[in-house]
Image (cartoon, rainbow, N blue to C red):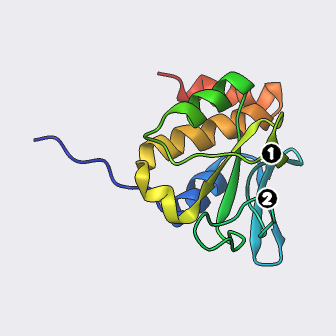
């Protein structure tokens, strides 16, 4: 019998990002910023005018920013219609994707883990990334 992958949650974002090695958490008010070596790789964004609800026009209050390793990775995530990732003009040329907390359940916790681990790898020092990969590669 095969099991159905569990949908991702906000708690999973915190668990996965916070569970990576050498991570510090900066709390900017109610928003969390996960960093490795002083570099952010996941953060919960404050409402901004460039990310608004398509129906109401209200600023989105539940946007998470996740770094990616390259523009190619960013485009792959954005172009996969199955995935809930998006961007805004503010993030043009920035190596990251956005996702609403409300839409995390559209991906599995395993997919989220891989994306957050890749985010960490894109921001960690070469030494830290190499050490982590040595113990986590298939």
Q: Using the image, tell me which numbered label, if any, was put on residue 16.
A: none
Query: CB of mark 2 within 8 Å of CB of mark 1?
Result: yes
| Residue drawn 61% across the image and 61% down it | 14
| Residue drawn 81% across the image and 25% down it | 126
Locate residue 59, reporting x and y percent. Answer: 72, 71
Q: Establish if 71 lies above or below 50.
A: above
Locate residue 46, reporting x and y percent. Answer: 78, 69
Secondary structure category for the residue under label 1? helix
Locate residue 122, reporting x and y percent. Answer: 75, 32
Cα–Cα gap, marks 2 and 1: 7 Å
Q: Earlier in the sequence, mark 2 or mark 1?
A: 2
Given residues 128 and 73, the one toward you in this image is 73
Given residues 26 and 127, the one toward you in this image is 26
Q: Establish if 90 lies above or below 49.
A: above
Decide if residue 107 is on the left or right side of residue 85.
Answer: left
Pointer 1 local density, CA inside 10 Å: few below 14, some 14–19, many at least 20? few
User: Which residue is under mark 1?
Assistant: 89
């Amino acid at each position: 019998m095969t099991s159905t992958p569990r949908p991702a949650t906000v708690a999973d974002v915190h668990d996965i990002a916070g569970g990576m090695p050498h991570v510090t958490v900066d709390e900017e008010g109610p928003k969390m910023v996960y960093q490795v070596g002083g570099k952010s790789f996941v953060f919960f964004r404050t409402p901004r005018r460039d990310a608004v609800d398509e129906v109401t026009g209200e600023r989105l209050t539940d946007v998470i920013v996740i770094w990616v390793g390259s523009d190619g990775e960013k485009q792959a995530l954005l172009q996969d219609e199955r995935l809930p990732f998006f961007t805004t003009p503010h993030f043009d040329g920035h190596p990251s994707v956005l996702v609403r907390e409300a839409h995390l359940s559209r991906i599995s916790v395993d997919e989220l883990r891989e994306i957050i681990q890749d985010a960490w790898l894109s921001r960690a020092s070469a030494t830290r990334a190499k050490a982590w990969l040595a113990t986590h590669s298939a």
